[in-house]
Amino acid sequence: MSSPGIDSAKVRELHDRELKKFVGTHPRSLALLERARAHMPNGVPMAWMVIDQEIPVFVSHGEGADFTDVDGHRYLDVNVSDMVMFCGYGNPEVAEAVALRAWKGTQFLLPGVEAVEVAEELASRYPVPFWQFTLSASQANTEAIRIARAATGREVGHFDEGLINLEDGRLVPVQRGLVKATAGKVRIAQFNDIEGLRRALEPRDVAIVLTEPALTNNVHLLLPQPGWHEALRAMTRETGTVLAIDETHTCVVGPGGATRRFRLDPDIVTIGKSIAGGVPLGAYGMIEPLAREIDVRREQGVTATGGTLFGNPLSMAAARAALTKVLTPAAYDRTGALGARLADGIETAIRKVGLPWTAQRFGPRSGHWHGPEPKTGEQALALRDQLLTRTQRLFLANRGVWEALPGAGPTVAVPAREADVDRYLDGYASFLGAVTA
Ligand SMILES: Cc1ncc(COP(=O)(O)O)c(C=O)c1O
């Protein structure tokens, strides 16, 4: 939909102008894209790299909070690779740990000391003592769901499965190729909708509720309403349902993520992306009764988990460096303070042009809603304006700021400084000026 206070014809014109400029200044990226199409569908290693943007830039290297493309354009990256690069590009602590580990062997199918230290560190941050490791947050979620199914003996709760949307009251797979039958294994309760949650859990056949502590991604940012988390915990307990909190995005708000900030008491925490400083790693922590499901001495057999490269020492070395040397309490304090500066600046810029928009605030990340703060996922989705978002992305990219996906930001990365926040705010204010002129 188009946003109140915005003339969409004007935005379309601005979009086309900015796209033309972008195309004209990225000849090397365009040539690589053309060449790559011969051997990669869409010209990229993964289709999603082009789903949300007109033209992908091909990247040469990153440094701190910035990266540089093959045409020599340097961008301040406020998307931080959808949170993966929160520690920054080429972080020296992570790079050194990875290089050392690479020289000494990166997988033995046996544990090393790094794994012990990473598990200890995560257990000190989140209220779940037992941890396992995968290569991505998606895989961590898959295994968390399997463990919950095994522990409860219930079937509702799937991951193919987490990829289900609610459309006009029907559950449908988000993309083609997913098994339609899994829609029958999932129930979607809207975030902040206590009555909806009650209806979903009442049949007592749900193995697991898996939710972010504050919703990100498609809805940009949706904070919990007072009472929501308390009701979620009480109802999952009452109905014998496992409660898993996915901290993959929200872990950037502090040690212990939003789980600690909101004083949550989940049965499982899943996490990934930034925890290994940009090296592939997913993890899930659980309470003791669930950990028993993967105790190999169990007579009934163990829950299906694992992959040959899961928990490898390279990922673990990177995570140990990221968690103990980069993602320190001081780093969260600094990025949180800069996040507040970012949100203040966004609020001021919105007020200046008189738009009925609202700034988001959540630790190091901010952004805006194209309207008043939404309370439910439905309201948040209704506020999305894809043309405006795409135009903002192009406009900022043409001015040296990369904001690839609205689901993650803008976010202040660990190496970012005040001047970087101000650089974003300058671009943002110019964009608002351009769409309201
Ligand atoms: C909350 C959340 N959980 C899990 C994932 C999956 O992460 P990955 O793509 O690294 O598997 C994402 C990805 O955006 C996410 O936002």
Image (cartoon, helix red, strand yellow):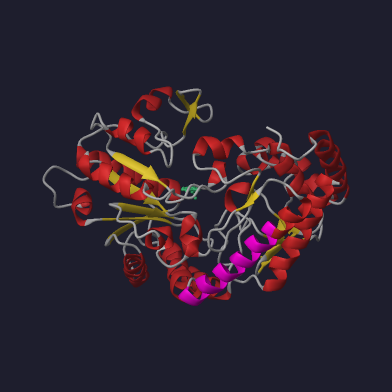
Furthest residue in direction left, as rendered = 299
Q: Could you say where residue 228 lies in the image, as x and y percent from the top left?
A: 38, 46
Q: Is residue 222 magenta?
A: no
Using the rendered view, name the quadrant where residue 114 is placed.
bottom left
Out of 378 and 130, give the one closest to the viewer. Answer: 378
Q: Could you say where residue 392 lies in the image, as x and y percent from the top left?
A: 75, 47
Q: Residue at x 53, y 59 (%)?
A: 362
Q: Could you say where residue 65 lies in the image, as x and y percent from the top left?
A: 66, 66
Q: Residue at x 84, y 38 (%)?
A: 10
Q: Could you say where residue 313 lies in the image, as x and y percent from the top left?
A: 41, 65
Q: Residue at x 46, y 70 (%)?
A: 101
Q: Is residue 234 above or below residue 339?
A: above
Query: Image check: 171 left or right of 22?
Result: left
Out of 406 and 357, give the one closest to the viewer. Answer: 357
Quadrant in which the N terminus appears? top right
The magenta stretch is 328-347
Query: Image check: 31 left or right of 200?
Result: right
